[in-house]
Amino acid sequence: MPRSLELARAAGRPAEDPLCRSQALLRDRWPRIREALEAADRLPGAERDRDRLLAALDRQPPGTRYLEAVRALDPAARAAGTAWLQSLAEAASGLWPDPAPER
């Protein structure tokens, strides 16, 4: 992150440029964002759904390609995987502000 901000500034973008402001904001907020993302996977429902999905995937024959393994999952395991991924997406979506309207 810091390197991309340096490159943008070296390319002549001022600190006030929306790209630079956005990158600086991400750099500054990253520790809190990372912590929140890591915690989201430990929520009781998310942890249960993740474990159901992983247990079902472990029952697939060794060497099974991922998409084939997912297609072979029973509906309950597939639903658990969907719920787990949705919980992560929802947790992540609230961590970043909506972009400022362009002027």
Image (tube, rainbow, N blue to C red):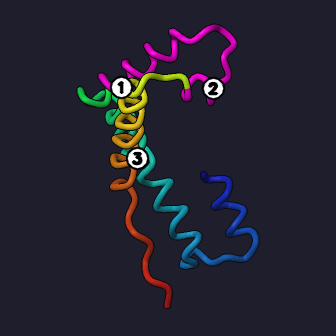
Give residue 30's position: percent from left, percent from top.
45, 48
Numbered disc in front, either 3 or 1: 1
Numbered disc in front, either 3 or 2: 2
SS at circle 2: helix
- Crowd around label 2: few <14 · some 14–19 · many ≥20 (10 Å): few
Residue occupying the point 51% across, 17% down: 57
Query: Label 1 near label 3: C-beta < 8 Å?
Result: no
Instruction: Please name the residue that numbered disc 1 is placed on.
Output: 76
Residue occupying the point 43% across, 78% down: 100
* Mark 3 or 2, nearer chain start: 2
Amino acid type shown at disc 3:
Ala
Amino acid type shown at disc 2:
Glu
**Relative to residue 14, is residue 91 depicted above or below?**
above
SS at circle 1: helix
Give the quadrant of residue 28: bottom left
SS at circle 3: helix
Give residue 71's position: percent from left, percent from top.
56, 29
Circle on res. 100: none
- Crowd around label 1: few <14 · some 14–19 · many ≥20 (10 Å): few
Determine if the magenta segment contains residue 102. Answer: no
Determine if the magenta segment contains residue 69. Answer: yes
Residue bounds of the magenta highlight: 48-71
**Relative to residue 78, is residue 19 depicted above or below?**
below
Q: CA distance from mark 2 to mark 1?
A: 16 Å
Circle on res. 68: 2
**Relative to residue 9, is residue 50 depicted above or below?**
above
Instruction: Please name the residue that numbered disc 3 is placed on.
Output: 89
Q: Is residue 75 left or right of residue 47?
A: right
